[in-house]
Image (spheres, rainbow, N blue to C red):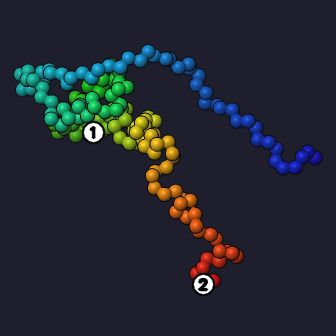
Amino acid sequence: MAGNGPAPKARKVRRNADTVAQTVLRWERAEPPELPTFEIERDGELREFVWPGRTREWWQMWIDSPQAEHFGSSDWQYLLDTALIHARYWSGNLSLAGELRLRVAEFGATPSARARLRMVFAEADGADGGSGRSGGPSARERYGNLRSLPGGKTGKGT
């Protein structure tokens, strides 16, 4: 009979290792394009497409966003196509809501999308000055003078 206790656990081996090597691309930041002017056919005539004001605000929000500094040319082109979906949505085509939601999630438009993409804001990392504290009193400062009662008594008349 061998030693006491359970047998040591076997070393876990990662079974989902990548089978295909990663492709490393050269990064090139791209400047955001302006919303283009173009014509659409309406009632048999070509008319200039007018971007809704809400879409112009939305486009500027993306240009000013922290994510924008990480966008390449293909990202801006994809977002430009998404702007057209946004414009159609704000012009009353509500059937595009799902596609719009999926597309903006790819860019980290919501807190949950940023969490999924592992995006964090730099100010949040340094907000506590590296102390790891929120600025309020610590638990030791709040409860440092508390002591337990002997015998496990709670002080409630027992």
Q: Residue furthest bottom?
A: 157
Give the residue displayed 45% in from the left and 52% down from the top.
135
Q: Residue furthest top?
A: 26
Three-letter amino acid code at the position of disc 2: Gly
Residue 58 coordinates in the image, percent (x, y): 23, 35
Residue 75 coordinates in the image, percent (x, y): 34, 23
Q: Please state if 132 lies on the left or on the right of 105 as rendered.
A: right
Residue 145 coordinates in the image, percent (x, y): 58, 67
Q: Nearer the viewer, residue 58 or 29?
A: 29
Quarter-of-image position of residue 15 = top right
Q: Nearer the viewer, residue 145 or 15?
A: 145
Q: Which residue is mark 2?
A: 157
Q: From this view, report whether residue 73 is shown above or below residue 14.
A: above
Q: Nearer the viewer, residue 154 or 97?
A: 154
Three-letter amino acid code at the position of disc 1: Ala
Q: Tell which circle, 2 or 1, labels the residue nearer the N-terminal end.
A: 1
**Quarter of the figure that contains the C terminus:** bottom right
Give the residue displayed 50% in from the left and 42% down from the top.
130
Mark 1 nearby-residue class (10 Å; few <14, some 14–19, many ≥20): some
Give the residue displayed 12% in from the left and 28% down from the top.
50
Return the mark for residue 97.
1
